[in-house]
Amino acid sequence: MLLHSNILGEGKPFIILHGFLGMGDNWKSLGKRFSEQGYQVHLVDQRNHGRSFHSKLFNYSLLAEDLQKYCEFYKLEDFILLGHSMGGKTAMNYAIKYPESLSKLIIADIGPQQYPLHHQDILKALSALDFSVVKTRKTANEVISEYIKNDGVRLFLAKNLFWKHPDELALRINLSVLIKNIEEVGKALSEKSIYHKETLFLRGANSNYIENVDELIIKKQFPNSEIQTIKNAGHWLHAENPKDFYNKVMNFISI
């Protein structure tokens, strides 16, 4: 039950955790750039996502334990951990439980607070894919477009499609379990949890995931943190402005 990953380069370990409905491959371009700077980058698929195992159980405690088992297997210590959105919540939970494992923590466009349900349209779109009828990626896109108008979001979702058989498409994500446990995705970090080591929070200028009012709770639970903003970017800040994202991460981890 080891998490699947794509490992790039050699050097100091640097783990990247994707967001909800994503996969490690979403980070391949940035991962390659980090690896070229002397880091061994681990692009990890979390459970029920990408090529990692499927399970009926899904919560942040389990996701953090999955990561710990992964680190034990590869003997990773004193590593950098970066998590985006859901992956950021996993990273926070991991950091609280295993602070001695980390050198630096980077959280991309998510805070420790509770978030309301807001993936309903996306989950409806994916649930509408009947693969006994949908036989091409083009048809899948047409079905999804009835629910999702944004081209970028549709392209992101389409990465979950794969050829299960030469004539049969399927989804890599464990959709039924993710729908059943969707409330877990927005859960807050325990208010008693405090992480004292260096942490960088990056937020998209056009995103509402980390607003000014949220800085109080971030500073309370991550007292040795800083919050920086990526201009011209929303929630997918690493894809919308990869140049600034890369530069801010490198400035933080190089100190």
Image (cartoon, helix red, strand yellow):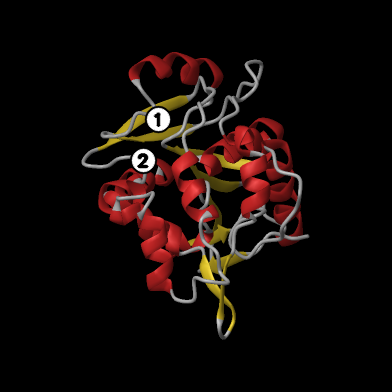
Q: Please report contact status of discs 2 and 1: CB closer than 8 Å, yes or no.
A: yes
Q: Quadrant of residue 45?
A: bottom right
**Secondary structure category for the residue under label 1:** loop
Q: Residue at x 46, y 26 (%)?
A: 225
Viewer-side residue, 119 vs 50? 119
Look at mark 2 in the image and give the residue it sits on. 235
Q: Is residue 226 above or below residue 157?
A: above
Q: Quadrant of residue 152?
A: bottom left
Q: Is any atom of residue 34 visible in this view?
A: no
**Residue 176 percent location from the top left of the image:** 66, 51
**Residue 171 percent location from the top left of the image:** 57, 64
Q: Residues within 10 Å of mark 2 (few under 14, many from 20)?
A: many
Q: Amino acid at mark 2?
A: His
Viewer-side residue, 36 vs 26? 26
In the rendered view, does 101 fall on the left or right side of 154? Answer: right
In the rendered view, does 143 fall on the left or right side of 105? Answer: left
Q: Residue at x 66, y 39 (%)?
A: 181
Q: Quadrant of the N terminus?
A: bottom right
Q: Which numbered tag is attached to residue 209?
A: 1
Q: Is residue 103 above or below residue 145?
A: above
Q: Residue at x 74, y 60 (%)?
A: 2
| Marked residue nearer the N-terminal end (2 or 1) | 1
Viewer-side residue, 202 vs 248? 202
Q: Is any atom of residue 225 visible in this view?
A: yes
Q: Amino acid at mark 1?
A: Tyr
